[in-house]
Amino acid sequence: MRTKYLSVLSIAVLFGMSTLASAQTYGPYPITLEGYSGDKADSTAYTGQAARQVLHTSLKKLASQGDGSNAAELKQQMMQYFSGKEEGRKIIAPTSRDGFTIVQSEVDQISKGVNLKGKTYKGVVNGWPGKMTGPEVIEFMIDKAANAKRGFDPVTGFDYPQLISKFAMGAVFYHQAVDNYLDEKLEADNKPNDKPYGEGKHYTGKEHSWDEGFGYFGAPAHALDLDANQAYGIAKMKDQAVADYNQDGKVDLYREMTYAHAYYAADSDKAGTDYLRAIFQAFLDGRQLIADANGEALSPSQRAQLKAHAETIKTLWEKVIAEAVFKYAGSVYKDLEKLQTIVETGGNANDTFRAYAKHWGELKGFAMALETGGKDLGEVGTRMNRLIGYGPALLGGGQVTGIDADGNYQIGGAKDLGGYMVHMLKLQKLMDDAYSLQARKNDATGDLEGLVNSLSEGAYSEND
Amino acid sequence: MLPIIQEVMADWVKAFLDPGKRLFWGYLGSALLIALLWMILCRQDHPRQAFKKLFAREIWFSGSARADYMVFLVNTLFMGSMLPRLIGHAAVATFCFTLLHEIFAGRPILLPDVSAFSIALAFTFVLFVMDDFARYAVHRLLHALPVLWAFHKVHHSATRLNPMTVLRTHPVEAIVFALRGALVQGICIGVFVFCFGEKVSLIMVLGANAFKFAFNVLGANLRHSEVPIRYWSWLENILLSPAQHQIHHSIEPRHLDRNFGVALACWDRWFGTHCYSEPDQSLRYGLSNPVANPNSFYSVYIHPFNEGARHVQATIMQTGHWLRNLSVASHNLFCRKTYHENEPS
């Protein structure tokens, strides 16, 4: 009897393992371009996007390297990673460390001649003072970061590495994917599937448009093999074995790394959502549909299906960013709670204020990112920006209210810490109402809803 | 079977399986046990006789009891899923929580060194007490305002009491109860979470508020029964006995508007409506001026609307009349010339 059970168990384990091993990866996909005679065998290509992912991670790292004396040099270096296209740029982050070996050490090893600026949202960013466009905002922040020690300005409470990173993720990756590749490039006459994406390319217009959207999302190609903690852990370089899908002993920054919003989707998923898998699956389904068209122009019904997948991706991607706004509004709220106590007891607020500034930078960056998705956020956007303001509420009262003609911040207003806590509460409610959030990490209302649910007896017919 | 029918039937069954509800089988069982012990030990009844009295046909199959069963079935059918959607406890709690931030310019966490259990115990107790007070206050309003009395009298039209009478409630009254619950629970949660943060939780027994569980398990179902269990006087000053609530249902003029409370007697004592139980009390229940056929569907569900509307109309007319009088008086006071002004010079 025991032998029988063991056999059944072994079969089940083997079946489970084979299922696991056969989980679909994003690529490789066959060449479908009619008339292609080159030696390429895989039509999947998102190297430019992966290169921009490492330009972003490198730029973030550089933004925290100011020491007060290297401003000009640091700014020039940061600009290389934002607007430059020159060869030989080193990957500043992520880099190999003990137990986590990375294949590439230079951006060119992934893709040559790419930058972030060319792909940055060109509209005016309402959440930042000065009526600047997306590239202007980032260049302004780069300038300020170069002049700040470790990227932090204690006068305004601005944490530039966080501001630059979270906004750039939206203004470049989210914007390009949802407002370009998964939007206008899905139209029949834009990058059609029966023509190469560009002259001499081995992939079709639609194949590459879809791949580019996927590359900007930032998921490893084997994301379906991973749970939320594993996908999240890759970006933190926790476990090489999890990242190294092809088992060559190294982690490939093109296909095996978690970046940007895929990382934040995994972060939400740790609280029970399923954003990463759902977005990834929609990318897979869309790509399969394009591959199945076998190099022919997509029919109206195929394009309708493709657009449905794109809509799923756009909706969930926006939710991932909104979840992050919610989460960091909660972090800021908790920091304010601590700061109030420190101020009242006359303690040293330096470390807490630093953490507060970091969380505020993340909050602000994500909130500004929401604006770049190509749709008018309307009242939600206006209220979101008003509740956050241009800067964090400062210990002595007030916050950044604008920028003067010389590019200096103006600080004013009477916003105190307590009033700003109320803003964070309202911001979380706004995000929840507008986006029907599920993860709701760092909910500032604590367990209000849980308590309410534990009390809802539904026994209102009971008389006295 | 249609899902809606399945849902309603599940709600009917759930009323007896959910420890959050008064008619949970465990509470009914404990009430039965208490009643039996009381009848055998205090009344010297033979067990068989006690059983016979408790399950008397004239109580459980009376027209009044049959109306109780009808109300239970009909209310569950039409209101089971509606009320929870109507009332936003969470909205009240969140509003209160946010408002306190604005009033106190932030959020000072109180008593950071006090244990989570102590906070939970305090929250559970305060919630129970506040809820009990709100029940008393709303109950008095139901008797005091004619328009509300039109609906509450459905409950008082029961001429025989049994545990199911607790659910003999007009839907309008149920909405009032739901609003009361949302307000009290929302405010309590909002204030406690604001003051004590994540330490706030509810101490529960079998999924019900621990104090409410104790109240129910100690024979709350005997309030609506004809078993006049009394407490010692000192205890009836603290907790209302089943016999005291039966006095509330009595049609004796001297019992009119007495014992509005639910668990605690202090509210009745402080507001002058307290009445001790009486030895060997034998009461008649119902309304002093009963409506015709009080147990019919029409009397239970439709008639209260007619009567309520009449009261609203009368109030409007009375207000109009009062405003007209006020207007005439103002005119006389400020606009008419005085006698002296009309005197020829």
Image (cartoon, coloured by chain):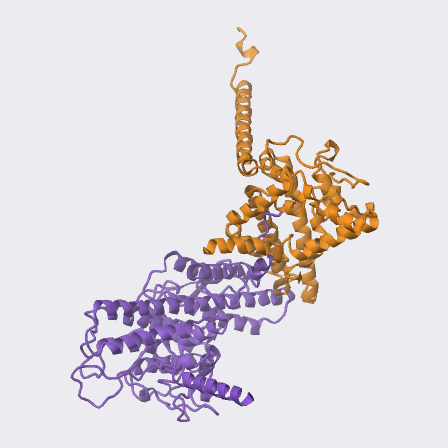
Relative side of A193 to A381, left or right: left
Q: Position of residue A101 (x, y in %)?
A: 43, 91
Query: In the rendered image, what is the letter of the chain coloured purple?
Result: A
Please give the count of numbered marks on the rendered protein.
0
The answer to which of A40 and A335 lies nearer the viewer is: A40
In the rendered image, the residue lying farthest to the top is B344
Relative side of B181 to B222, left or right: left
Q: Residue at x 29, y 88 (%)?
A: A87
Relative side of B275 to B205, left or right: right
The answer to which of A262 and A153 lies nearer the viewer is: A262
User: Against A65, is A448 above or below?
Assistant: above
Q: Quadrant of residue B104?
A: bottom right
In the rendered image, the residue lying farthest to the left is A35
Q: Colour of chain B?
A: orange
State whether residue A454 appears in this view.
yes
Quarter of the image for the C terminus of chain A: give it. Answer: top right
Q: Position of residue B96 (x, y in %)?
A: 57, 53
Q: Position of residue B202 (x, y in %)?
A: 64, 61
Q: Position of residue A213 (x, y in %)?
A: 31, 75
In the rendered image, the residue lying farthest to the front is B48
Quarter of the image for the N terminus of chain A: give it. Answer: bottom right
